[in-house]
Amino acid sequence: MKKISIILSLALLIGVLSAIDFTFDGELRQRAALANDEYEADGGWLDSRLLLGLESQLHQDLSIRLGTQIGDIVWGNGAGGISTGASLSIQEALLKYNINALNAKITVGQQYWMDKMGLLMDDYFSGIKLEKEDFFGLNTELIWMKSYEGNPYSNNDEDIFVLHGNMEESIPMGLYAIYGNYRDMDYSNISLYPYLSLDLAPIALDIAPFLDLQLYDGDNEFGFGAAVKAKMDLDVLELGADFLFAGENGITTISPWYQNGLYIYGIGKHHDGTNLYWGAPYSGNADTFFSGVISAKFPVNESLAIFGAAGYLMDLGAEINAGIEYELIPDLLNLNVFGAFGNHDNDTNNYLFGSSLKMEF
């Protein structure tokens, strides 16, 4: 009976979807890499990932979206074949409704959110987001994230509440106020994270200081720090700088994806690094943390560009990297080749060579 019910449900779902007009978007990435680990053991792999989104405007005030991910599938995983296993996941399953009476939008379900820098979160979450433009001159977001349910009959949930307001006119600036309550760990935090964006052509500057009060089992800890990103576009050359500082215990993160332009000691544009030493050293670090990265990009022509970066992370190590970006088909297919060398403070030397073929549609 259960199998029959599942089959009937799938048939009904297909029937409903076939009566709805959807728009598609997605990203297909094929990637290859050669690297060594923290013990300098050599290795290499190839992997694939497909992101596919379906969206439909059911009514002028109501839309739905489904987003899936297949991957990251490592080639050869499963006796020489490609085994999806648990690699198929639902990233987005949401409905968005315009509340005309309030001139606001509400989004309910599994959805994506990122803070200004990706310091706290650049990921999907389950919850509710309420957005309202021009609320006393501010664009505002009020978000409830259900980060962990736990046992439905136990008081061990994890909830995060985010209030975000920003103004885009004159000087773009904003503020995140975050409260996280992790009942199963008897932990909570209050985070304040203002930011300022300045466009002083040819220089663009983003400044984001942060404060964090961490309450754990009756003990109070305090963290603070700041992130600064700068870019200079000289037409024939693009220069960049990234500085990140954290004192005491830094800031409580949710699911961060802070890109500092490095690949071994950070997250770069074309690879998420070898994940050897990065993590989130600006969070929960009892010692002072500092990192500095400088970068450059040289457009050879409309299709080809050369890039590189160098940086140092306190108590971790230093890295230098470089690569090329080649647009095979404008606004559709791109090829990126990159390499990085790093030296850990324990004198371990690491490398990463890779290439990615990415189609965005």
Image (tube, grey):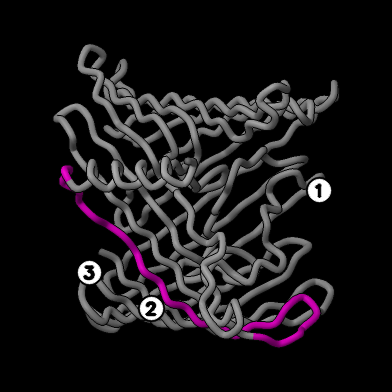
Whether residues under marks 1 and 2 lie with C-beta atoms below 8 angstroms apart, the answer is no
Q: Residue at left 65%, top 42%? A: 225
In-front residue for pair 2/32: 2
Q: Is residue 36 magenta?
A: yes
Residue nearest the observer in this picture, 34 or 312: 34
Q: Position of residue 79 (x, y in %)?
A: 61, 82
Label 2: few (<14), some (14–19) or many (≥20) C-alpha neighbours in 10 Å: some
On screen, 342 above or below 137? Answer: below
Q: Amino acid at mark 3?
A: Asp
Please indicate whether residue 283 sits to the left or right of residue 286 in the image.
Answer: left
* Region in magenta: 19-43
Q: Is residue 294 visible?
A: no
Name the residue that disc number 1 marks. Answer: 287
Q: At x 51% / y 33%, what residue is drawn?
A: 194
The residue indicated by pointer 3 is 331
Mark before the other along the chain sequence, 1 or 2: 1
On screen, residue 195 versus residue 21, left or right, reads right
User: In the visual, does 120 lie left or right of 51?
Assistant: right
Q: Quadrant of residue 92?
A: top left
Residue beneath disc 2: 357
Foreground of the two, 310 or 110: 110
